[in-house]
Image (cartoon, grey):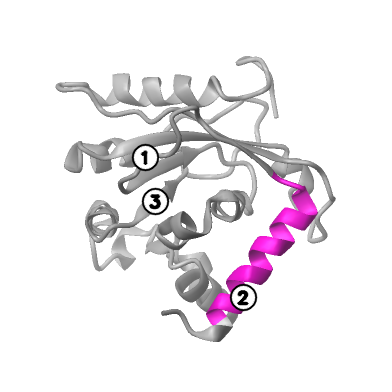
Amino acid sequence: MKPLLTTVAATVIVLFARAVTAVRAIWPEQGLPARPCIYFANHSSHGDFVLIWAVLPPRRRQQTRPVAGAEYWLKSRLTRFIGRDVFNAVLIARERDQRTQNPIEQMAEAIDAGSSLILFPEGTRNQTDAPVLPFKSGIFHLIAARPETEIVPVWINNLNRVMPKGEFVPIPLICTVTFGDPLRITPDEDKDAFLERLKIALLALSPRPAGGGE
């Protein structure tokens, strides 16, 4: 059972995220997977995983861990408390020489322990006019290691306008978080084909034309 302070902090974060964004979740017809899965989403704001985490039903939220950069979330006592205790994030060291564990193993162990994950295959925030950046290969290697795990595309719309780059005060706007149908890797599917299929599934959830910008 989580300490009271952690529970209160989580509740405040969820309520704040919902109040600022008036976020609306759009669910797939078949619902979310019953077993641990991977939610993968477009990435244009520091608040992306918070919004996904906030719209999940409480039980699923407790079982879902964002994957995030250790350098950012371990830099102060406050961020360490939020990252480790509130979000229970899987913290990945971005610099290879600072790693004590293989990132794929870290994520696979979290799945094996019964957790779902929130991943951003672009690897960094998209500040370009392209709808998404090229996907990194990490998600492919993770799924290759745990091929039975379902992968759920998630499109976050409007959050980059709530927290524009360089701004510290959010601008209240309505956001949506759209969950797509779960996917699985197919036998003998190679990396490029797999990543392209994920990208197509993600862009299909966007309210903008595939060639449009943010």
**Rendered location of residue 199, percent (x, y):** 45, 24
- Can you tell which mark lies on residue 33? 1
Asked if marks 2 and 1 touch (Cβ < 8 Å), the reply is: no
**Amino acid beneath label 1:** Pro
- Can you tell which mark lies on residue 9? 2
Magenta portion: prevailing SS class: helix
Q: CA distance from mark 2 to mark 1?
A: 27 Å
Which residue is located at x 66 percent, y 15 percent? 209
Name the N-terminal-most of marks 3 and 2: 2
Q: Which residue, given by chain and number where applicable, does mark 3 sit on?
A: 117
Residue 75 visible to an observer of this rendering: no
Quadrant occupied by the C terminus? top right
Q: Is residue 186 above or below residue 177?
A: above
Q: Residues within 10 Å of mark 1 (few under 14, many from 20)?
A: some
Q: Nearer the viewer, mark 1 or mark 3?
A: 1
Q: Does 17 appear in magenta?
A: yes
Residue placed most toward the observer, 142 or 72: 142
**Rendered location of residue 164, percent (x, y):** 77, 47
Residue 143 visible to an observer of this rendering: yes
Residue lying furthest front in this view?
Answer: 30
Question: What are the residue bounds of the magenta stretch?
Answer: 6-23
Which residue is located at x 28 percent, y 29 percent? 184
**Amino acid beneath label 2:** Ala
Asked if marks 1 and 3 touch (Cβ < 8 Å), the reply is: no
Q: On the image, which quarter does residue 102 sit in?
A: bottom left
Name the N-terminal-most of marks 2 and 1: 2
**Amino acid beneath label 3:** Leu
